[in-house]
Amino acid sequence: ALDLVDVVSALGADPKATAELAQSLSSRPKASPGYFADMQKKLKTLVEAGQLGIFAKAYWGHPAYKLPPEANLMAVTHYIEALEWQRDVVKLHAVFGGKNPHPMFLVGGTPNPIDLESDSAVNAKKLALVQSIIDQMRTFVDQVYVPDTLAVAGFYPEWFERGEGLGNFLVVGDFPSAEAGSDLRDPMSWWIPPGAILGRNLDEVHEVDLRADSEIHEFVSHSWYEYEEGKNK
């Protein structure tokens, strides 16, 4: 969402009005006028020094930015806070001996063993830390990320139609259930079951049989390749 936020515009925001905006969107206690005023001062120091760091090389002041200064200050404040907060999130990787960044390139499983009674393995204390971080993550997403995203999106309704495709959406499913007795081979029992949306109709989700060759086809009508049989076959 920061791509749609004018960072420099936040300098002209009223911290009190920013706090009122944040409080109208979320019940998060960390939303006082003083909090936003302090962050505004830090941002002003960066701008006046000409060293915007991660906020450099943008088009500040461009008319395409539609957020009012208060919304910009709120979004920038939460973005900076998220950068600090993510340092705690990556502790999850450290607890289990994982890799960061790019954890998707690591073979499944965890290098560190789990032994609740051991001091050198993942014990009860470390698992409690993991749960605490996950709880903080959920709170941050619910009280900051989602409200901010919805607030920013409200100023750019035209973007919901830009780059739109055919209105069809296919999900192959994921996250099998770990409950006893569940069949991992049954996609309909997964947390996200397979399904398809056709013609922008969000009221109807069609079931998809991933094992049926007749249900999923591959077409090359719009490819750059040439086929003797024709592109529609």
Image (cartoon, helix red, strand yellow):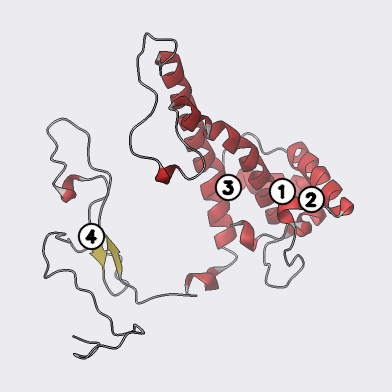
Of the numbered discs 4 and 3, the one sitting upstream in the chain is 3
**Relative to 159, 222 lies left or right:** left
The reply to whether callout 1 and callout 2 are in contact (CB within 8 Å) is yes
Say which amino acid is labelled 2.
Asp
The reply to whether callout 1 and callout 3 are in contact (CB within 8 Å) is no
The label on residue 18 is: 1
The reply to whether callout 1 and callout 4 are in contact (CB within 8 Å) is no
- In the displayed structure, 63 sits above or below 212; it is below
Q: Residue at x 81, y 56 (%)?
A: 12
- In the displayed structure, 59 sits above or below 111; it is below
Q: Nearer the viewer, mark 1 or mark 4?
A: 4
- Circle 2 is placed at which residue position? 14
- In the displayed structure, 153 sits above or below 82; it is below
Position of residue 199 measured from the top left corner of the image (x, y, whole percent): 29, 75
The secondary structure type at the circle numbered 1 is helix
Nearest the viewer among 72 and 187 is 187
Q: Quadrant of the N terminus?
A: bottom right
Of the numbered discs 3 and 2, the one sitting upstream in the chain is 2
The label on residue 25 is: 3
**Relative to 153, 205 lies left or right:** left
User: Marks 3 and 2, Cα distance to the nearest angstrom?
Assistant: 17 Å
Position of residue 153 measured from the top left corner of the image (x, y, whole percent): 55, 61
Q: Residues within 10 Å of mark 3 (few under 14, many from 20)?
A: some
Q: Is residue 221 visible?
A: yes
Q: Residue at x 29, y 85 (%)?
A: 221
